[in-house]
Amino acid sequence: MSTVLNAKVPDGELRDKWDNYKADAKLVNPNNKRKFKVIVVGTGLAGASAAATLAELGYQVDAFTFHDSARRAHSIAAQGGINAAKNYQGDGDSINRLFVDTIKGGDFRSRESNVHRLAQVSVDIIDQMVAQGVPFAREYGGMLDNRSFGGAQVSRTFYARGQTGQQLLLGAYQQLSRQVGLGGVRLFNRTELVDIVVIDGRCSGIVVRDLLTGEITSHAAHAVVMATGGYGNVFFLSTNAMNCNVTAAWRAHRRGAMFANPCYTQIHPTCIPQSDESQSKLTLMSESLRNDGRVWVPKNADDSRSAEQIPESERDYYLERLYPSYGNLAPRDISSRAAKRLVDKGHGVGPLKNGVNLDFSAAIARLGRDVVEERYGNLFQMYERIAGEDPYKTPMRIYPATHYTMGGLWVDYELGTTVPGLYAAGEANFSDHGANRLGASALMQGLADGYFVLPYTISNGLAPLLNKPVPTTDHPAFVQAETEARERFNGYLNIKGTRSPDWFHRELGKIIWDYCGMERTQQGLEKALSELPALYSEFKKDLRVTGTGESINQTLEKAGRVDDFFQLGMLMCRDALDREESCGAHFRSEYQTDDGEALRNDEEFCHVSAYKWTGDPMAAELNKEQLVYETAHLATRSYK
Amino acid sequence: MNQLTNLKLKVWRQAGPETKGHFESYTVDKVSDEASFLEMLDQLNERLISEGKEAIVFDHDCREGICGTCSLMINGRAHGPQRATTTCQLHMRTFKSGDEIVIEPWRAAAFPIIKDLMVDRASFDRIVEAGGFITAPTGGAPDANLILVPKPVADAAMDSAACIGCGACVAACPNGAANLFTGAKISHLNVLPQGQSERYKRAEAMVHAMDDQFGSCTNHGECSAACPKEISLDVIAMMNSDFRKSKSKNRKALSRG
């Protein structure tokens, strides 16, 4: 049995759809908005911008974050920039070009209407953030500066040094804080979502756990927004912050929200290679570095000389060689695989031969050290802190690492999940990036969803509910969800086995990385699907959580998150196995062209795979949303 | 890659906000010099769990020096011995075998201890809520290039905006003052053309929210020395100047700029 997925795409020409939608959407009168309560879970770019905007409009907003402050959300770590089709450089950009670049970058696996809307509202985001005082980089005349990013031939990326995510998040956080001060938003910090509650087919609220006291409570609302980020930490080692997790999205999935394209996980080409076994996370070096850095490896695999001693003629600038028109700015999936192949062939550099060079000597000679320092100074400093080498003198060593997840909760055009009243925004949804996200587009999507999409679509959803009673937290469904949550957390404490949650997480990550990482095969995925359930049942028998559930207990928090990562991991591998093609970041070795590029199968797989919970992640029900391209032309990507 | 051996840690353990805390000694027999300081603590925690003991609680998240979640007084210094470096970016290569390392939480009345090494920094959020923003409701903004910001002004705003809100400035201050944090946000917004409409009101509201919760500044400068983002003491001068003007400028004067 499968469900028909209705994406609710409005009628009309692609460029008119969003205007048509807004013209037809139902509104809630300003005096009635205060009668509605909206819960926003997560305070990153999507969550903070949505909460602030909804409160400005007059809705009662409750915002939840597991961080100590809304300003800590992982959006803060984005470095390079944010795209917008402003065409301030007069270099041929337009809404249509950003739309086409994003569709093509996503390897024709995203929904046209959503992507086009994203490109349309991108220009409003820059206006909004500048008005809030985000200190974007400027030209001497005072106008905004831009740079270029992978997968684009125009300069449409706005940036604030190497801290663009930080500055945008602080902008949204400040706007949210203003509303907290005014009483428009009630903010619950150090509070983690542990379940959502669905009554009569509609999302009626959430169940949360106070991380400081372990207390489990319920919150009812007319609508709930999940802005809870991605699930890259399923790999254990990733560039995600340590506390990023899939729990909120996964708990929503278990209550009926379909999970789409879980196997689309992005590997970022420029991260600092792993230095030893005990490493807890990987650090990203912004893709913007590829504007001025040249990627190379020694032509001779056994070359053990230091980078400066290798003459030009013995260096292989492989991205420039393989992809002359995009060169060092080839998209992320393509650059990552090229690096992996050369390292696998033994051309890697560094003590463990597990990286490639990103060399700035040509840029320093051309532009001078001052200009390079101004553009990338803080990134160079960060690299030096971690690697202990000076990138002004020796090339950086980089290698791909898990960074972003395109998959997520399935949403329709209104960003509504398959559970009415439950919305998903930002990285938590699947909608805009297809099988591969372009650089500087995550910040754009998070802010687009929170500022310029949800405020319209939520009012359309709430208007018909005016003056109708909604369930309160004494409803048996809330009481039962609370009881289940208490039992689940007590359960982790009562196993009293021998292995910590981190131990299981590391083992889980190894399986996922080995078999569902940069390159996947049928054989490998089948192996993963046989090993995962065994490890998961070990987790349920042999987990050890010390301490109690009555005061802050980070080991217990971790146990809950690893539990959900296990289930997600199984669904990911299953999805990767089902998708018998290569597209974007999903690369199945069986499906590649003669020169090793991804080989799509549009006949059979031009669809979104959306899974419905059945009680067993290995046996989730697969539903398909067919992708129809009316404007963009289905074509094989070429960056040559 | 080298191994450090025989590190002697003295770690502050405190079961809850109202409980009396104490130093607990641990020996770390072996750790790679490539490990970060927090990875060293991770390994210690794994050992504690394997011994059936409760792990040491400490705040951390991005481990890239940008989220501002991590803290720790290491040998009496906020974020440890390395200049312009957060605890999460501190690596064990900074230490040597046999070192004694004392690890404490931030020490400040406005940051009460939650448990072990974790403190409550909500007082910072209260300062921002009081005025650390530009009122710009979603939707009404003019085209971004209509607001020209001279490059030196944008750069100066960015220098102040780099603050990560970690609280090292307060922890390092003998008075537990938050002037560097508050001054950084005021300087970020008050130098920009977009920030002018609320300039003096902002300075006034934020300084009052700060004074309600934190100690007073006596110009020691420890804050700037401890700041992982090297925020300059100049921001405090700008805050003081704008705060003073906020008390004398009436509406008529404001309208004349």
Image (cartoon, coloured by chain):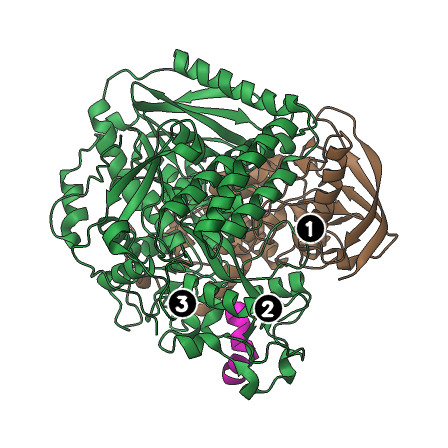
Residue nearer the viewer, A576 or A105: A576
- Mark 3 or mark 2, whichever is nearer to me: 3
**Residue holding disc 1:** A278
- Rendered image: mark on residue A395: none
Is residue A372 a member of the stretch shown in magenta?
Answer: yes
Q: Amino acid at mark 3?
A: Gly
Q: Which residues are magenta?
A: A362-376
**Where is A511 relative to B150, above or below?**
above
Q: Subunit of mark 3?
A: A
Residue A198 figure quarter: top left
Q: CA distance from mark 3 to mark 2?
A: 24 Å
**Residue holding disc 3:** A596
Which tint is chain B?
brown
User: Which class describes the residues within 10 Å of circle 3: few (<14), some (14-19), or many (20+)?
Assistant: few
Residue A173 spot, x, y in % from top left: 46, 44
Residue situated furthest left in the rendering: A12
The answer to whether marks 2 and 1 mark residues whose Cβ atoms lie closer than 8 Å is: no
**Residue holding disc 2:** A397
Residue A598 figure quarter: bottom left
Residue A150 spot, x, y in % from top left: 40, 66
Chain in green (letter): A
Q: CA distance from mark 1 to mark 3?
A: 33 Å
Residue B168 spot, x, y in % from top left: 67, 48
Count of all numbered marks drawn on residues in the image: 3
